[in-house]
């Protein structure tokens, strides 16, 4: 009898992990997080995982307890003689620190990769890294899922007449161009200049938007400032409607206020990070099916890349 699959969740991704386990067809594994009065915590598996494929679901968004919890779960699984330990990280935190862009700064995403490997992870499954080159920071396999698999069907059902895609900044250009090419649609770029993190100094639109239905696409929505400013600028330039699709809803600071007071028709996000509260302008699409299939294919040694990395785009072409 070969190794069986056990799926466990950290406290940060409990709801998503339950959906993934349900779609996979297995109960969520039993684990508890023992907490001490000073804030220290210790994950404890409440069932045997000896010789099993252990999938640990945890997004590493703030607070950083989520990352530490994942590292401790990996270490505990290693010490409990799990056969393979796969870190399922729907949102990979510190991904914006992917290079040394100024003197005397850390490369946080590389450090996180090193910590995951050192703790004992054999594989990582994640989605829409802020910088795809982060995969090269690992010496273990990384399966990089693509949210286009769920965003494309959503856009199709909108049946927008004059569909045009917009990149909220130059860094999103490649991501947006791929989806625009699938729909054979036009693309524009909102070129922004920052004074400092989370503060936009200026923004200009490159391309024609008058009379068009604009879909902004990005990987994360943090304070919502970029999306709100881009939507307002696009409207001022004559866009008929503006909506946004973002994979990871960090939604920090005044994000909810910024989104709700903006001209955006709606903001579509994934459940890689749980929402802090509900909003009439924010709609959530689940990634549970994608991760459930990825887990099954990883267990059965089937292709994952062909299923998710621009698979729909290649099929269209």
Image (cartoon, rainbow, N blue to C red):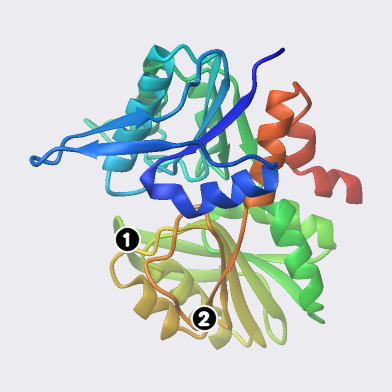
> Of tags 1 and 2, which is closer to the observer?
2
Q: Residue 260: x percent and y percent? A: 43, 83
Q: Which image quadrant for residue 97?
A: top left
Q: Quadrant of the N terminus?
A: top right
Residue 172 appears at what percent x and percent y? 57, 53
298 or 213: which is nearer to us? 298
Q: Residues within 10 Å of mark 1 (few under 14, many from 20)?
A: few
Q: Residue furthest left?
A: 38
Front-most of residues 140 and 133: 140
Q: Is residue 123 left or right of residue 253?
A: right
Indicate left or right for 176 with 244 as reference.
right
Left or right of residue 118, residue 239 in this image: right
Crowding at label 2, few (<14), some or many (≥20) Cα neighbours within 10 Å?
some
Q: Are marks 1 and 2 in contact (CB under 8 Å)?
A: no
Tag on residue 281?
2
Q: Residue 247, relative to residue 105: is it above or below?
A: below
Dot 1 falls on a residue whose secondary structure is loop
Q: Residue 18's spot in the image, x, y percent? A: 54, 49
Q: For the residue labelled by badge 2, is the local secondary structure a helix, a strand or a loop?
A: loop
Residue underneath mark 1: 198
């Amino acid at each position: 009898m070969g190794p069986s699959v056990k799926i466990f969740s950290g406290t940060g991704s409990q709801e998503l992990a339950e959906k993934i386990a349900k779609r996979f067809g297995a109960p969520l594994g039993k684990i508890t997080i023992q907490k001490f009065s000073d804030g220290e915590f210790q994950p404890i598996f409440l069932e045997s995982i000896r010789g099993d494929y252990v999938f640990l679901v945890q997004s590493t968004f703030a607070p950083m307890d989520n990352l530490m919890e994942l590292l401790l779960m990996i270490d505990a699984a290693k010490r409990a003689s799990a056969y393979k330990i796969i870190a399922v990280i729907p949102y990979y935190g510190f991904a914006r620190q992917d290079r040394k862009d100024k003197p005397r700064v850390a490369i946080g995403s590389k450090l996180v990769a090193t910590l995951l490997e050192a703790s004992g992870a054999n594989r990582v499954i994640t989605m829409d890294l802020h910088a795809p080159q982060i995969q090269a920071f690992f010496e273990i396999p990384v399966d990089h899922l693509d949210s286009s698999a769920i965003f494309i069907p959503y856009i199709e059902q909108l049946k927008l007449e004059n569909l045009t895609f917009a990149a909220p900044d130059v860094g999103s250009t490649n991501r947006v161009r791929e989806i625009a090419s699938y729909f054979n649609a036009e693309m524009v770029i909102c070129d922004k200049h920052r004074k400092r993190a989370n503060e936009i100094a200026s923004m200009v639109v490159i391309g024609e938007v008058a009379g068009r239905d604009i879909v902004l696409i990005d990987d994360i929505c943090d304070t919502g400032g970029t999306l709100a400013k881009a939507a307002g600028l696009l409207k001022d330039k004559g866009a008929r409607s503006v909506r946004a699709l973002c994979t990871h809803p960090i939604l920090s600071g005044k994000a909810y206020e910024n989104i709700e007071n903006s001209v955006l028709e709606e903001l579509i996000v994934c459940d890689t990070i749980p929402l802090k509260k509900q909003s009439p302008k924010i709609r959530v699409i689940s990634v549970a099916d994608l991760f459930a299939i990825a887990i099954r294919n990883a267990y059965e040694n089937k292709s994952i890349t062909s299923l998710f990395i621009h698979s729909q785009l290649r099929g269209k072409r």
